[in-house]
Image (spheres, rainbow, N blue to C red):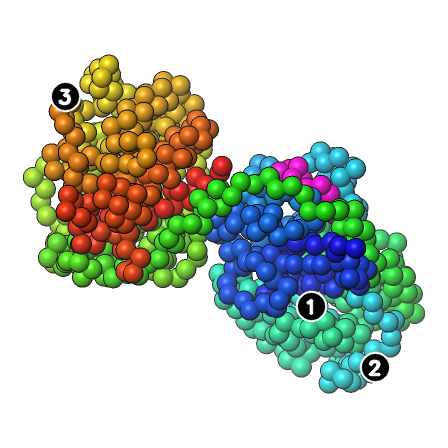
Amino acid sequence: MTPKKVAFISSFLPRKCGIATFTADLIKNASAAGGESFAPIVIAMENGSHVYDERVTFKITQDLKQDYIAAAEYINFSGVTSVCLQHEFGLFGGEAGSYINLLLNKVSAPITTTLHTILEEPDNALYQELVSIAEASDRVVVMSRRSERVLRELYRVPPSKIAFIPHGAPDIDFVDSTYYKQALGFHGRTLILTFGLLAQNKGIEYAIRSLPPIVKDDPSVLYAVVGVTHPEVVKNEGEAYRLSLMRLVEELELEGHVVFVDRFVSDEDLRTYLSAADIYLTPYLVKEQAISGTLSFALAAGKAIISTPYWYAEELLAERRGEIVPFRDALAITAGLRTLLGDRQGAYAMRERAYEFGRTMTWSKAGAMYWALFSRYGSPPAIKIKSFEFEAVRNVPQPLMNHLQRLTDDTGILQHAKFIIPDRSSGYCTDDNARALEATALYYDQYREREALRLLDTYLSFVAYAQKDSGEFHNFMGFDRRFAEEDTYSGDQTGRALSGLGMVIAKPPLPQYRLYAREKFDRSLPVIRHLNVRGKAHAINGLAHYLAVHPEKDDLRTEIAGAADSLVERFRETATGDWEWYEDVLTYDNGIMPRALFIAAKVLKNRGYLDVAVTTCRFLVSRISNGRWFSFVGSNGWYPRGGTKARYDQQAVEAVSTVQMLGSAYEATGDSAYVDLQRTAFNWFLGVNDKELPLYDFTTHGCYDGLHETGVNLNQGAESLLSYMLALFCVIETSTIL
């Protein structure tokens, strides 16, 4: 018999995560039920760098969109008979964890999804995400009866699609605690236990505040808080919460009565602590908690339990299987502890009721129920994903930061380089630092690398410093950090600055970045209507990013409409039957104007903008593509109406503006022909061009400054590098929404 190959999509050990532990236990116990008929593999969700065992055959970086597409491709070509997704919103990238749907919608195998969180009052994004997950799944597993009801009534999931399987818990004997206390060094103590990853929503401070009267009555009482701080909490807040708890212990003079076991405990250690405990305490603060693995374990071990009334606790501890106390009420916890410690016979009876109920939810039973679901599916299904999608995402050079770091000092990114050596005499410009701001915001959003954040800080600081009191932006700065007095003000740099600030508003590394970028953006709103045509086009891009996270700001819609109307007016004033363009000459950064109208059409649902965007996009492509590759308008003479197109020097800025234009065209129209054109335009960087020479340098990870009649310009400056990076991110973005 051919084994059932099941791909588990989840975090996984040694990552310190409750779902990672759950998945390892699930695989172990489904294996016990399925034997040699069960062949599990793991697609591990990665938010750092972990060393896995052989069961992990593919990794998905949480915020890297293309990894989800690649994982779908991998699953489809791996002979998988079914997929088991462990779903928790915070485990996946994108708004409300939406990136996982990129994978689910491309996987051919049937999907069983275990929902670890089901919200009863979700916002629209969280609601739509869970609905999409359920629609993509063949079966949806819930771990509480309340969750089952909410899934039916609120999310409208058909009952036939829902399976109830208990959380799963260790099969621990109903034992006397004395031996196990001695093994832990707690001999003679009355042990109260809380275990699990530490975070502020656990309410440990209320448990500690409940202890002084208890300790006064019984000096043998010891409260053990077992577990490390949640890794995401450590990343964002450090150990501030644990330290606050330790200070509270000192203030209440509870040293010797509270112990913190700061480590991620093994299954064997967990059994020992549970067996040693007299009372298990979960003083959690969030009523909406639908599942608690720690509570399941304590119940199955037959512990006397005190808990706050979060949803899962109300269900598990019904029928006097535990003591329920109000949220954030230390006095109530004190009363509960006194009741259990003072009535040993009543506490023992509670333990028996808990243990008997716990026999229905041991891991061996849960594993067998999951195996029954997996065994329903037979041979690997037919593949429904086309490999060209995988190629479009993976078969491109990844955006490495080597040359970006080389060109950047503590002021900003330098404009030019002599070969690969930064040219300090050229100084800096806002145009390039705004491009760099946009590129590093995208980079950090995808890769979460600390170096990208450091560079982003530098570029954001430069752009902010370049802003004038009027809201306009200086452009050129010498190496002496003095801005040049511009003879003329084009407005390009202001539009680009707003495009970069808009990206930070849309994809901030931390909330403070959004607040700062929004403050700078708002100062420039009044000047948008006075910008030149390219400045307005770039500003539309920034405005759309801003509006995406602040849809309530009608003034942003007004500004988009005003700038788009100006572009349409320019087109109508200039265009003729054989010259459907905004100006009498095709010069630089041409694609930004049709792109801006595609964006405005999509955001404002304006057909007039879309018609002009399609017309001018078609005109531009007809002038720069021969059907096999793109030959962009050269800067050595441009392309005047009625004249001849300059073939050289072709610039990288033309390639990126074309790539972005075609990506926005696809988003606005859904016409996949734009995607094929986009990839061809991007391939200009890789050698699909008039000289069959790559502009991207695979050795330095920079980009040559242009394509000349004699070959490439060997200098690798900022504009060309950033054009390549932004074009690559655009191709990836388009590929993930196919």
Instruction: State which region is magenta.
Output: 129-141
Looking at marks 3 and 2 on the same chain, the residue that comes earlier in the sequence is marked by 2
* Residue sitting nearer the eye, 130 or 62: 62
Dominant secondary structure, magenta: helix
Identify the residue at horizontal 87%, vertical 77% (top origin): 176
Q: Residue at the location (90% across, 69% down)?
A: 348
Residue assigned mark 2: 178
Q: Is residue 295 left or right of residue 80?
A: right
SS at mark 1 in the image: strand
Task: Give the residue type that dot 3 points to.
Answer: Gly
| Amino acid type indicated by mark 1 | Phe
Q: Quadrant of residue 194?
A: bottom right
Q: Residue at x 48, y 48 (%)?
A: 66
Q: For mark 3, what is the residue?
A: 642
Identify which residue is drawn at 43% across, 55% down.
447
The residue beneath circle 1 is 195
Label 2 Cα neighbours within 10 Å, binned few <14 / some 14-19 / many ≥20: some
234 falls in the magenta region = no
